Amino acid sequence: MSSPRTVVRQYWVAIRALLIFTVVLGVGYTAVITGLGQLALPWQSNGSTITVGDSTVGSALIGQGFTDKKGNALPEWFQSRPSAAGTGYDASASSGSNFGPENADLITAVEARKAAIAKLDGVPASSIPSDALTASASGLDPHISPEYALLQVDRVAQVRNLPAAEVKKLVDDQIQAPDLGYLGQARVNVLELNLALAKLKG
């Protein structure tokens, strides 16, 4: 059986180790990594925020809706991918629907989205790409496929009284190639596209 003196010594060693590792790993490591991030990648470290003038309008990493207060798509803007995160694009509730492909609720939601997009853009339902109909796993995807962006060109051009060719060129200019040329797929950041769109005279 350990003597009281030995027990006290063991507790004191444990307490000192706790304090040292708290300072080194909890404070020091955090400070070093934060400092390196601010020096090497300040934009990314601060949330990849996008500003217009003095106002922050969003993040390049988190999608947002371009709808009215009732959730109806605003026809003058390119529309984002559906979101299942909270009430939509809620970064504090990142999540997909977790529905399987045969889930009745998912099928109903997809069919409703398909009908709404077909009506809004005046296109056949068969031409609507899958990313326009299904939410991403995070519910925060800021990108859509080039196919979905191009599908919306005629509607946006008509509402804004712009030549369709000019709007199409805008989309083409905003298409981001796969990372390193082969990782992922080509994509369009909807917020960045709409900010570029807002600069066109129409």
Image (tube, rainbow, N blue to C red):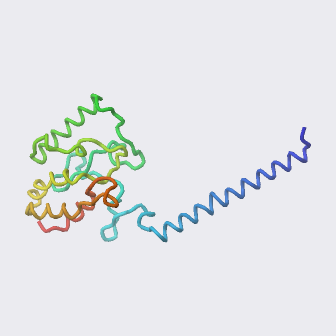
Please name whichever residue, 60 or 131, is drawn nearer the observer in this view of the structure.
131
Residue 160 drawn at (x, y percent): 11, 60
In the rendered view, does 128 fall on the left or right side of 46?
A: left
Q: Position of residue 61 (x, y in %)?
A: 36, 57
Q: Quadrant of residue 77?
A: bottom left
In the rendered view, tell whether residue 14 sits above or below residue 84. Answer: below
Count the numbered circles shown: 0
Quadrant of the rendered image containing residue 196 = bottom left
**In the displayed structure, does residue 28 sit left or right of residue 195?**
right
**Image quadrant of residue 143?**
bottom left
State the image coordinates of residue 67 (x, y, percent, origin top left): 23, 50
Looking at the image, which residue sits at the far front?
Answer: 182
Q: Which residue occupies 71% across, 58% down?
A: 20
Find residue 1 and report its horizontal and vertical position in percent: 90, 37
Left or right, residue 4 beside residue 164 = right
Q: Is 88 in front, or is 107?
A: 107
In the shown orientation, is residue 109 left or right of residue 201? right
Which residue is rendered at x = 40% and y = 50% of the image?
Answer: 91
In front here: 93 or 110? Answer: 110
Question: Looking at the rendering, in which quadrant would you find the C terminus?
Answer: bottom left
Q: Is residue 124 above or below residue 79?
A: above
